[in-house]
Every structure is written in structure tokens, then in C-alpha cells.
Image: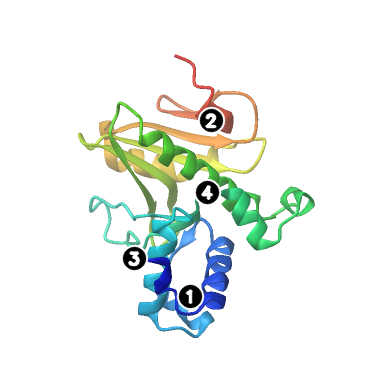
């Protein structure tokens, strides 16, 4: 697809803003089309273009038929969280606010970092998200060719509680030995155990992993 195929540059810019504001959320082209007043097919084409120029990334849904209540819609995030922050007009004070936008932006940052690392990792794996219609969710699923899974939750807080592992425990009950580990990545500094397969890790563990 070529950049010349953009027919309405103003709508394209607005679409990028809408996607930035929905970083970490389910991607529904028809809903975006309704807001923009554009046909769904046009929105889908523009989204493919944003993906091809590495501005956005979609994470497909994962189910493995664990439950018929699994949501099948992809999630979307901006590849560069700095661009997402700019497009949303978010300043440092807003990021520090209680219930502010840091959570989705941090999830997008983690997903983008993992996507980059998967391109050079010796272990081949694909990235997914998991969510059920009754709101049990896991932000990131990494599954290798042996169908082994590492599940990751991202929490924009300096403390972690047992309930933050709700989605991870849900998967553990259904996957058994196929779940290798479940991690909550948070903004604190300590590695904390929450059971045989579960750990809370600082986000910095993404690039400061110890052998």
C-alpha cells in the first residue's frame, strides 16, 4: 500500500489521534468509522497503512478454545509511546495523575519492547492478548511453537497485590503445565514471588534481565 492512497489527510491524522487515545483497547474499525464519518473499508485500509509504516501494531486475540466466551477482537497500540503521548496532548503532570493515562501507555510500551525483542530472540514466539466477555483478561500472551505460554500483565503502579494476578491464575487453571510462567510488570523495583509460577517484576526487567 502506498502513501499516495491516502485520500483525506485530515481524517488520517484524526484516525491516528483516535488510535493513540485507544492504545491498549480493542480495535473496532466500524466504531472508528462512525466517529470519523468514514466507511469501515476506508478505515480498515488506513489502519493497514499505519501498521505498514510501523506507527501502530495490532495484537490478535488468543483463545485456543479455552472458553467460548473469549473475545476475538484484536487490540491496538502505538509503537512509539512518545508519539502516542504527543498525539493525545498528555503532559508529565497528567501522566502522574491518579487514574491517568499512564496504564495504557505503559502497556503499549511493554508490548512494543517485547515485539522488538521477539525479532532477534532465539526462542520463536507469537504475541497475543486474552480477554473474555466477562472481563477476565491478560494483557500479553507469548506462545511458542510447542504451545507453551508466558503470560504478562502490565500495572502502572509501584505496588502489586494478589488480585493483580487474577487473569494469570485463570489461565493457569486452564492451561496447566502449558503455562510456563505468569508475570506482572510494574513500576516498582523489586522482584516478588506470588506462587510457584508467578512473579512481580520491575518493568526494567525487560532490558536488565539477569542470566
Residue identified by numbered label 1: 32
Residue 43, how many percent across, how many down? 42, 75
Comparing marks 4 and 3, which lies closer to the viewer?
3
**Of pointers 2 and 4, the one earlier in the residue sequence:** 4
- Identify the residue at image location x=40%, y=64%: 49
Q: CA distance from mark 1 to mark 2?
A: 35 Å
Callout 3 touching callout 1 (CB < 8 Å): no
**Of pointers 3 and 2, the one earlier in the residue sequence:** 3
Badge 1: residue crowd in 10 Å (few <14, some 14–19, many ≥20):
some
Question: In which quadrant of the rendered image does the C terminus lie?
Answer: top left
- Identify the residue at image location x=51%, y=36%: 184
Residue identified by numbered label 2: 200
State the mark number for residue 99.
none
State the mark number for residue 108.
4
Q: Secondary structure at mark 1?
A: helix
Q: Secondary structure at mark 3?
A: loop
Residue identified by numbered label 3: 1
**Of pointers 4 and 1, the one earlier in the residue sequence:** 1
Amino acid at each position: 500500500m502506498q502513501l499516495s492512497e491516502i485520500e483525506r489527510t485530515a481524517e488520517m491524522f484524526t484516525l491516528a489521534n483516535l488510535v493513540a487515545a485507544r492504545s491498549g483497547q480493542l480495535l473496532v474499525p466500524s466504531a472508528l468509522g462512525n466517529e470519523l464519518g468514514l466507511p469501515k473499508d476506508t478505515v480498515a485500509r488506513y489502519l493497514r497503512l499505519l501498521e505498514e509504516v510501523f506507527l501502530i501494531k495490532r495484537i490478535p486475540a488468543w483463545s485456543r478454545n479455552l472458553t467460548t466466551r473469549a473475545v476475538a477482537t484484536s487490540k491496538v497500540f502505538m509503537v512509539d509511546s512518545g508519539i502516542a503521548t504527543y498525539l493525545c496532548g498528555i503532559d508529565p503532570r497528567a501522566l502522574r495523575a491518579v487514574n491517568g493515562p499512564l496504564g495504557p501507555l505503559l502497556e503499549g510500551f511493554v508490548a512494543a519492547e517485547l515485539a522488538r525483542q521477539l525479532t532477534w530472540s532465539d526462542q520463536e514466539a507469537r504475541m497475543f492478548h486474552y480477554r473474555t466477555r466477562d472481563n477476565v483478561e491478560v494483557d500479553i500472551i507469548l506462545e511458542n511453537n510447542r504451545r507453551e505460554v508466558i503470560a504478562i500483565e502490565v500495572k502502572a503502579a509501584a505496588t502489586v497485590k494478589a488480585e493483580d494476578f487474577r487473569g494469570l491464575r485463570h489461565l493457569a487453571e486452564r492451561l496447566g503445565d502449558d503455562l510456563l510462567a505468569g508475570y506482572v510488570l510494574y513500576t516498582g523495583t523489586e522482584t516478588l514471588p506470588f506462587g510457584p509460577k508467578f512473579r512481580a517484576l520491575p518493568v526494567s526487567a525487560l532490558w536488565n534481565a539477569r542470566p
